[in-house]
């Protein structure tokens, strides 16, 4: 295998199990499933004759396309070899050059970089969708984009952001850095780790393919029975989200197993870095919530393709069943988006405040509390749906109660700044912005949790502004903090700081100027997902659109920075540019194949910054050293 | 400078800012918030927003003061690499923090529940409303959502169906919201009423319009291709004008309505067809 790579002629590098064969088998698989689907006939499928939309064929096409793609990438080789009784290493492509990045690779560092570029691509596409949506909303009635395409754009933007960005932080950064932070040589299940990435890429391609089938008008929530009525473009939504759910579940299991079993000697739970705690609590959410999503999408798929009626009210089903199941996944899902951000925030703030983390256990309790409570709030999405009105006070209380553990995360982060020596580096700026953004997002969430206030704003732009403040302001800002912080480790080169600051200030100001006015628009009565709006809303909408274009421009500044710094300047980064005490910065750059020659022994938590206080602290029970837990 | 001096300054600045800002937000901005005083429900929503804003303002003031002070005072000057003070926590601070947030949350939950008990605040409560006026005192109006229009049936006036909506001022209204196809949501922002229209379900919302005025009607749940065009305006008029309007509508739509199914709290339509 790889030992002979150097001796091979150049063209042989393209032959074998890699992305190329994956794509070929993806296409073959799709047409096989398509053909198979057309062979199936049944009385109950006669609607296909009327509409010329054969959901069975399309779904089988997607199914076999995914199977073909994975076989082409080489995921079947190891299990097949073992089934035939052959000895085979479960490592794949761990040595070698650039071609490692275009196939199945069991090195967690390669998978992390694959994720970073893969997620980045879809983040860019979904961002472009947002630009088109805002361009359309410059005017109160559609001029640029017809109503159907507008809804497809809205649905694609929402679905892609929600689906892809769930792994936006954990995919690149947890895969890359959790093993380094806990002193492990790899992840617990390296082949599964690679599988999660390629499943996500297959999902992204399937979602994009919806434009060949007329798109879908349901938004990312895809409520029944609209989803049963929707064109066959909706089938790609089903496959996309089910594959994302599968990828999330596997990623979560892998991280949980890694963090529980593979910590280096001395790395007790009380010394685990906060980013690992964020990844750990997110993983528990993923493992418990995502299977519900897969199940509900299977049910929708059967409803659409073979006329079962889980969710069709006129045939005995219930649209409430879909709403309940979807939000039972959907609310933990939004915390799957928020928690990695908490982890990055609490990881980075001590480094740049030059202080130990204030209240380690407070921060951990905050994250675990958010994780636990997020399973008990989902019906706040259904406050006006007519379901179970007597439970509203409970869901109002449980939703508001989430602000208690969230408040602990704020306390932990804010108090870490207290009497520090704050360095305003680019990653720190993104972290500081988190406090403002997430405060506004959280406070507006309290308005939405209050039922009377929610009746006024439910389904309006107010909600839209709220979740952009939490997800974009919470997750995407920390995502960029993580990029600026860890790129010197991942690529051995540093990003330009001046361009980074330009990017930050543009994005921060434009972000607030985009989403703050949306609160006002929502309160005044502008619903979400509409292609027309009352003429009196036009001035504010123009303001919002222009600000949104500035966010888009700030992303171009970021891209320019990446190209400029990593392709042209290629300035070698210092070994530990931020003077961090975390374990990943103690390894050489580039990180050697198995990270550590021998397991490191940990004797403190990674936040050992600062000089001891000048005078003894006032009376009262002293906080035990964080290592004691 | 020692710890208590920093804290004293922050507390003073926070008190000053809060004492100035909170009354302005609560009494100047608060009462003028949408959705306005169009009905008992919308007035209740304004009151909720006013109280919530009044609670959030001092917290926001604390954030502003804390970050304004810390980022200026505790920043690193020049190039020399300094280290902060190694404080690893303070159990008094975390106890107080936990206590204060818990008290605020408990207050919010009790306050919200009390407000909700006022006729459900205009929200849809399903077929068996928990909060609302005495049974049988409100004027029932059925709202039927279908792609992509709302129509209205008046069971106390023979159950005729019309695409227009006028309401009598000063009378408790019982909206019975249902749908013939997908989920819609009946939203009249100025009246503070919002209720999802589910196929096969009767979703009841109460509202009492106070003054004669026009109001908007929008669908606020994505319902397919022309969702963005599913809007209309309605009118609140005096009781006499309302009865006259009913009479005129009966004349125009009564004959057509005879061909409709009899009035029911919900309808079971044909199975879904692909389209849209």
Image (cartoon, helix red, strand yellow):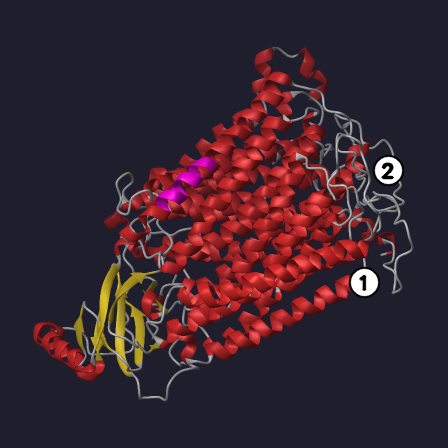
The image's mark for residue A599 is: 2
Using the image as rendered, state which of residue A31 and residue A547 is in the foreground: A547
Q: Position of residue A217 (x, y in %)?
A: 35, 49
Is residue B30 at least partly visible in the picture? yes
Which residue is rendered at x = 41% and y = 69% of the image? A384
Element under disc 2: loop
Q: Position of residue A478 (x, y in %)?
A: 62, 43
Which residue is rendered at x = 39% and y = 41% of the image? A545
Q: CA distance from mark 1 to mark 2?
A: 35 Å
Is residue A364 at least partly visible in the picture? no
Q: Position of residue A571 (x, y in %)?
A: 68, 19
Q: Residue furthest right?
A: A616
Q: Which residue is mark 1?
A: B91
- Is A8 left or right of A151, judged from the image as shown? right
Q: Residues within 10 Å of mark 2 (few under 14, many from 20)?
A: some
Image height check: is A96 above or below A64?
above
Using the image as rendered, state which of residue A606 and residue A254 is in the foreground: A606
Q: Which residues are magenta?
A: A541-550
Question: Which quadrant: the C terminus of chain A?
Answer: bottom right
Image height check: is A334 above or below A207?
below
- Is B63 left or right of A241, judged from the image as shown? right
The image's mark for residue B221 is: none
Using the image as rendered, state which of residue A501 and residue B73 is in the foreground: B73
Image height check: is A591 above or below B74?
above
Q: Assess whether residue A546 is covered by the magenta stretch.
A: yes
Magenta: predominant secondary structure element?
A: helix
Chain of residue at mark 1: B
């Amino acid at each position: 295998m790889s030992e002979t790579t150097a001796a091979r002629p150049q063209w042989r590098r393209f032959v074998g199990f890699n992305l190329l064969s994956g794509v070929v088998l993806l296409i073959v698989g799709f047409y096989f499933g398509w053909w198979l689907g057309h062979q199936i006939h049944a009385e109950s499928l006669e609607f296909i004759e009327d509409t010329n939309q054969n959901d069975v064929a399309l779904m089988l096409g997607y199914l076999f396309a995914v199977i073909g793609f994975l076989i082409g990438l080489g995921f079947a080789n190891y299990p097949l070899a073992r089934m035939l009784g052959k000895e085979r290493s479960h490592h794949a492509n761990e040595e070698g050059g650039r071609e490692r990045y275009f196939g199945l690779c069991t090195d967690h560092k390669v998978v992390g970089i694959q994720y970073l570029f893969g997620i980045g691509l879809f983040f860019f596409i979904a961002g472009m969708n947002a630009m088109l949506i805002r361009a359309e909303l410059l005017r109160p009635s559609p001029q640029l984009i017809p109503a159907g395409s507008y809804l497809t754009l809205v649905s694609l933007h929402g679905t892609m952001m929600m689906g892809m960005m769930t792994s936006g932080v954990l995919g690149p950064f947890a895969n890359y850095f959790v093993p380094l932070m806990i002193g492990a040589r790899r992840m617990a299940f390296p082949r599964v780790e690679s599988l999660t990435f390629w499943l996500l890429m297959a999902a992204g391609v399937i979602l994009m393919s919806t434009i060949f089938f007329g798109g879908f008008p349901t938004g990312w929530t895809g409520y029944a029975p609209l989803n049963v009525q929707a064109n066959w473009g909706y089938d790609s939504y089903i496959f996309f989200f089910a594959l994302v759910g599968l990828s999330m579940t596997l990623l979560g299991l892998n991280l949980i197993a890694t963090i529980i079993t593979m910590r280096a000697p001395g790395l007790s739970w009380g010394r685990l870095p906060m980013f690992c705690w964020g990844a750990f609590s997110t993983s528990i959410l993923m493992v418990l919530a995502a299977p519900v999503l897969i199940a509900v999408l299977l049910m929708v798929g059967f409803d659409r393709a073979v006329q079962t009626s889980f969710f069709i009210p006129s045939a005995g089903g219930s649209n409430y069943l879909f709403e309940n199941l979807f939000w039972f996944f959907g609310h933990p899902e939004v915390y799957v988006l928020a928690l990695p951000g908490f982890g990055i925030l609490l990881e980075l703030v001590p480094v740049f405040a030059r202080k130990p983390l204030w209240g380690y256990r407070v921060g951990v309790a905050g994250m675990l509390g958010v994780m636990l409570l997020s399973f008990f709030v989902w019906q706040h999405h259904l406050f006006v749906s007519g379901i179970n009105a007597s439970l509203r006070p409970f869901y109002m209380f449980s939703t508001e109660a989430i602000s208690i553990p969230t408040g602990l995360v704020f306390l932990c982060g804010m108090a870490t700044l207290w009497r520090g020596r704050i360095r305003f580096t680019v990653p720190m700026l993104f972290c500081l912005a988190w406090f403002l953004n997430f405060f506004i997002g959280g406070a507006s969430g309290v308005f939405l949790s209050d039922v009377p206030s929610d009746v006024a704003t439910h389904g309006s732009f107010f909600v839209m502004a709220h979740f952009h403040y939490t997800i974009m302001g919470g997750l995407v800002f920390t995502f960029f903090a993580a990029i600026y912080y860890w790129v010197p480790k991942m690529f051995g080169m540093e990003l330009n700081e001046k361009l980074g600051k330009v990017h930050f200030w543009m994005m921060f100001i434009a972000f607030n100027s985009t989403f703050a006015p949306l609160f006002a628009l929502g309160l005044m009565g502008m619903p979400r997902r509409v292609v027309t709006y009352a003429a009196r809303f036009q001035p504010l909408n123009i303001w919002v659109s222009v600000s949104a274009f500035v966010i888009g421009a700030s992303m171009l500044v970021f891209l320019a920075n990446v190209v400029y710094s990593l392709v042209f300047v290629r300035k070698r980064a210092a070994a530990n540019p931020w003077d961090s005490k975390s374990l990943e910065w103690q390894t050489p750059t580039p990180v050697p194949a198995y990270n550590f020659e021998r397991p490191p022994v940990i004797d403190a938590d990674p936040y050992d910054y600062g000089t001891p206080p000048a005078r003894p602290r006032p009376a009262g029970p002293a906080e035990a050293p964080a290592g004691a837990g | 400078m020692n710890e208590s001096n920093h804290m004293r300054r922050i507390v003073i600045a926070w008190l000053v800012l809060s004492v100035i800002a909170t009354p302005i937000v609560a009494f100047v901005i608060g009462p003028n918030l949408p959705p306005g005083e169009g009905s008992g429900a919308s007035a209740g929503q304004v009151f909720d927003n006013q109280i919530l804003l009044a609670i959030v303002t001092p917290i926001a003031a604390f954030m502003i003061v804390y970050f304004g002070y810390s980022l200026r005072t505790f920043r690193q000057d020049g190039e020399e690499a300094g280290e902060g003070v190694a404080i690893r926590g303070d159990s008094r601070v975390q106890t107080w923090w936990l206590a204060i947030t818990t008290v605020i949350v408990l207050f919010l939950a009790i306050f919200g529940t009390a407000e909700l008990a006022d006729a459900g605040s205009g929200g849809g409560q399903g077929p068996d409303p928990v909060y609302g006026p005495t049974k049988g005192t409100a004027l029932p109006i059925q709202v039927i959502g279908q792609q992509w229009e709302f129509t209205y049936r008046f069971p106390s006036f023979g159950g005729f169906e019309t695409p227009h909506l006028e309401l009598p001022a000063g009378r408790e209204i019982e909206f019975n919201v249902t749908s013939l196809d997908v989920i819609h949501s009946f939203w009249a922002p100025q009246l503070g009423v919002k209720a999802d229209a589910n196929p096969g379900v009767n979703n009841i919302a109460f509202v009492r319009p106070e003054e004669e005025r026009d109001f908007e009607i929008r669908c606020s749940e994505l319902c397919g291709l022309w969702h963005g065009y599913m809007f209309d305006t309605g009118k609140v008029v005096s009781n006499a004008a309302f009865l006259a309007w009913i009479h005129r509508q009966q004349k125009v739509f009564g004959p057509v309505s005879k061909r409709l199914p009899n009035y029911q709290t919900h309808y079971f339509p044909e199975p879904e067809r692909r389209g849209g």
